[in-house]
Image (cartoon, helix red, strand yellow):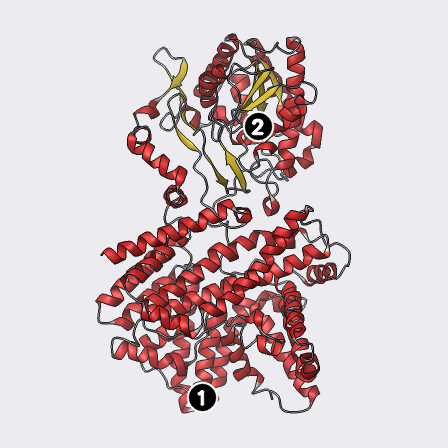
Amino acid sequence: MFLTSLGLATAVLIMEAMFQMFFVTPLWNVLPMPEVSLYGPDAPTGYAHRPGTSGIWMTENRSHVTISAQGLRDRDRPAVPNGPRIVVVGNSMIEATQVAQGETAVAVAEKSLQRHTPGIEVLNLGLAGATPAVEIARLFSRGTKLRADLALVVVPLGDLLSAASRDDSGFTAYRQQVDGSYGLSYGFREGRGFRFRTSAAGDAMYAALDHSFIATLLNNRKNIGFFAEFPSRPQAPSGDARPQSTCQGANLNAQARLWLTNEPADAAGVRDAFIRDLAAFQKSGTTVIVLVQGLNPRCELNQRQKVMARIIQRFAEAGLDATDLDAEIVRRVGASNIYALHGFASSLGRGHLNVDGNKVYGAIFADVIRRSLSRMGSPAEPRT
Amino acid sequence: MSYDTFYFAAFLAVTFCLFQLLPWKGWVLLVASAVFYSVAGLHDSLLAAAIILANYGFQFAVIQRKAFLWPVLAVNFGCLAYFKYRAFFAHAAGLDLFSGGIIIPLGISFYIFQLSAFVIDLAHGKAEPFRSLAKFTLFKLFFGQLVAGPIMRWSRFGPQIDRLFDKGRARPQLISLGLGLCVLGLFKKIILADSLAPIVDSIFSQGPSDPATAWLGAWLFGFQIYLDFSAYSEMALGLGFLFGLRLAINFRQPYLVRNPLQFWRHWHITLSRWIQDYLYIPLGGRSGSPLRQGAVLVLVMSLAGLWHGPNWTFIAWGLGWALLTVTWRFGGSLLARLGPFEWALTLALVMILWVFFRASDLREAVLFIATMFGGAPSGDYTLPSAYFDRLLILTGASGLLALHAGERWLFSAAQVRRMIRFDGPFLRALLLGLALLLVMVPKTAGNPFIYFRF
């Protein structure tokens, strides 16, 4: 029994040493690595980045990801900014773990703006899987502390319709309150998973994940399933940004129903609550610019224009500026080239933004920020 | 089931436990092999069952009358031709048939060759028939070598199967050696081969923009296919040792050979022996005029290429090998004067030929090779321009050859004896732990063993 245990322990040590060697050499660029566990429990949102975490991201493309002391997919920032500070909120498209930190759209925008406004900061509040409710919770919990002058909020319109926006079992969501209105709900806090992850055992687990590649390997495996490779029915590929041979009208029709006729009622409730909460956040002193995306810019242009006009009007009624992000992208690269902004190597056209895609988004963010700051007046004085 | 998965490890654990506990060793392996193959699907399983039954029945006819050899070979190769090559042959004949995709039944190229070798040996008195259908089925279906070889001959494998059923155990199980080979195979496949795959895919799909990139692509593919296939073969060997079976070695560091004539005695050894014994020698081998010898080589190597897949690129690859073999057969003594450069030349030529193996069609292959020699770019994939990055790439590429040379030490008789001598709970647990951790390593998307496709 002792020899068997010693043998198994030696195996663990050998594999640990192997991954450590890969990590500290350029071999991490080529050889397999356990993917870093970036996320931990967060009371306002359900989950968030764990401050100080660092490791290799393996999905879609390899990159070395570091989470700042503020718990953002960003570099460390001073508590009090020296110049204008902008935060960008969004989901995994903004988080952009598949590219290096300096190549994210947010970093590209910051670099561009710093040429003319040294000291300006653009912070990445992107979080994978962030629904509108999570974005709001993140703005209130982190955006307020960061004392931002401006917040860009990227909203995939499809999220307003998805059931995930109303399911609080894993993260915060909009649920119908007693009075019929929709508000943020935190049912995840009662879940076993959240309670474990915020306990001492959870702390020990995260400490193991931070210091041991084998712990991360086993955790990753547990997450995808030990029998994940067992032959099963082929899944439809997700996130295909390649040019479609036919327009899929279902998405536009669903958005038209939501924005023009307020159907279905639960999605309309989520939408209204989201707009309400954004306006409330703006009242706290940070100007909010909403960047909406998700209406295919190649299809049914008249119908699309009508729906987009109503979307922008609806935000304007709440005192919020809204911009059609898809139209900006088309203006810059052309509709037929949008696919080239996504994916890597043989997966070009699928998945998240590649380096070029982040450059385009970054340029758009920079322009939006410039226009907004000039409308707001000269850049804010350095804070004391 | 792929060997580099956790569910295969679970299957293997259950099979091993039952093998240890139950007295009916042969039946345990037979049932396990049937379960293993059934994961491939109903069509594949029914086809395999039909071919097994046909060959089982025919073997008795063959030993009565040798003339029955031809019908059974016609059945075997007819099935192979239909299930693997029908679209290719139809297209070559200008017919637009079978235009939908073909899914090649799992392992068909390997088990047809193994069965055919058996009936040919039977006809020539070099094998004995299997009276028991169970034994015959395990001879053909043993999960350790079913999918991608090694192609086992009756003389080596048949008596082992007999002993397994009759005496309840074949030879001693070499647990640590078996596990060690599995760990080596898993490391070569999961850590090395699968890491090269995305780079090779990118270079070939986008096309190289300059000679350095083209040579790197060929080099990396050459090592990807070696690591992938030899990994499988070593795991097959290891699985055999776990159950007291001795399978044939399929690879002996082929990139260290001096000339192309030696290559096929070190690469996919069981296939090259099959081709030598059942095609090359019956067609005349080394006898006759140089022209006749060359013609036989061209035919045999073209068929060897075609065996790998229904594409003209594989035939071109085989033809390339025929040319190399003829050149060294008749000019070898002159080329030997190159000394160590003969090895370098051989390696370069082997890598050039791999381009045909990897390219999706002849045009892509020719353009790729042209780029290798300074021709126009065949695409836009380019290596990083920074000096340090290029140095790293060169170091990595050289490192692959160094690891290859290091394998010779690992497979030395001294190391094998050491593994057997130190077999015990510590070593077994160590190797088992390594194997389990390796199968949990994240896989780059969709990289089955390359030779599973054949």
* Residue nearest the viewer, comparing A114 with B82: A114
> Type of residue at label 2?
Gly
Quarter of the figure that contains the N terminus of chain A: bottom left
Total of numbered circles in the picture?
2
Crowding around mark 1 (Cα neighbors within 10 Å: few <14, some 14 to 19, many 20+) is many
Q: Label 2: chain?
A: A
Give the quarter of the image for residue A250. top right
Label 1 sits on residue: B123
Q: B88 above or below A123? A: below
Q: At 61% across and 10% down in the image, what residue appears?
A: A380
Circles 1 and 2: CB atoms closer than 8 Å: no
Q: Quadrant of the C terminus of chain A?
A: top right
Which residue position holds label 2? A294
- Residue shown at the point (43%, 81%) measured from the top left: B118
In the rendered structure, the answer to whether residue B322 lies left or right of residue B45 reads right
* Residue B37 percent coordinates (x, y): 39, 63
Residue B201: in sight, yes or no? no
Q: Position of residue A376 (x, y in %)?
A: 64, 9
Q: State whether residue A332 appears in this view.
A: yes
Of residues A352 and A314, the one drawn nearer to the viewer in this rendering: A352
List x then y, in percent, for residue B63: 40, 89
The chain letter for the residue carrying disc 1 is: B
